[in-house]
Image: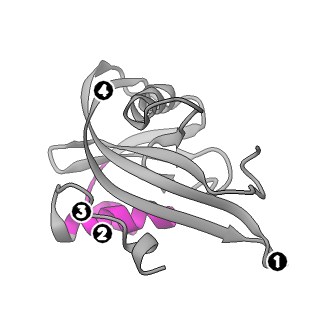
């Protein structure tokens, strides 16, 4: 099943890396959201544990090795085309990840990888779900499952 026009929602993961009040962001190289800043992440493969997927995706996109610590939130992204058909539908699991090694560099699907002051990040061209996550972190702090607003409130 491809990412565009899926029969069912696809499950993705996001690696939330925070260091000295700065959050790691990547500029997306592919749709959806090409050119926007987002949390590093990607798709969970069939049979893969999401905590393993988030660490794999972090390394693929940024060169950093990490360990998943805490599920921070569950977010949803739905994009419809001009005819109202669902073009993209993702359920995203965002994990707090502790960096254990590696060197920061953009790779894979990311055009750029940078640490940005978490408050200043809201001034960037962010994906909807990255903006929602960062707002939740600023309001609630780092707590288990601070997200879910887009799933619960629809």
Q: Which residues are magenta?
A: 116-138
Q: Is disc 4 surrounded by few (<14), some (14 to 19) or many (20+) residues within 10 Å?
A: many
Determine whether 28 is above or below 8 in the image.
Answer: above
* Residue denoted by label 4: 66
Task: State whether residue 125 appears in this view.
Answer: no
Disc 4 and disc 3: Cα gap in Å?
20 Å
How many badges with numbers are in the image?
Answer: 4
- The image position of residue 80, as x and y in percent, is 72, 72
> Residue at point 25% right, 63% down?
146
> Residue at point 54% right, 41% down?
42
Contact between marks 4 and 2 (CB within 8 A): the answer is no
Q: Nearer the viewer, residue 65 or 13?
A: 13
Determine whether 140 is above or below 14 in the image.
Answer: below
Is label 2 in a helix, a strand or a loop?
helix
Residue 82: numbered disc = 1
Is label 3 in a helix, a strand or a loop?
helix
> Residue at point 68% right, 52% down?
31
Q: Is disc 1 surrounded by few (<14), some (14 to 19) or many (20+) residues within 10 Å?
A: few
Q: Nearer the viewer, residue 63 or 53?
A: 53
In the picture, which quadrant includes the N terminus?
top right
Task: State whether residue 23 appears in this view.
Answer: yes
């Amino acid at each position: 099943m491809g990412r565009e026009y899926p029969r069912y929602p696809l499950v993705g993961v996001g690696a939330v890396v925070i260091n000295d009040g700065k959050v790691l962001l990547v500029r997306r190289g592919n749709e959806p959201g090409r050119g926007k800043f987002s949390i590093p992440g990607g798709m969970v493969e069939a049979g893969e544990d999401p905590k393993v997927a988030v660490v794999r995706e972090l390394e693929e996109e940024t060169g950093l090795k990490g360990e998943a610590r805490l599920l921070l939130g569950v977010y949803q992204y739905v994009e419809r085309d001009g005819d109202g058909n669902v073009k993209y539908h993702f359920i995203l699991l965002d994990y707090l990840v502790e960096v254990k090694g590696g060197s920061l560099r953009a790779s894979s699907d990311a055009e750029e990888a940078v640490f940005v002051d978490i408050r200043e990040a809201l001034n960037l061209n962010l994906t909807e779900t990255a903006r929602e996550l960062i707002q939740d972190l600023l309001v609630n702090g780092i707590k288990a499952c601070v997200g879910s607003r887009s799933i619960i409130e629809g």
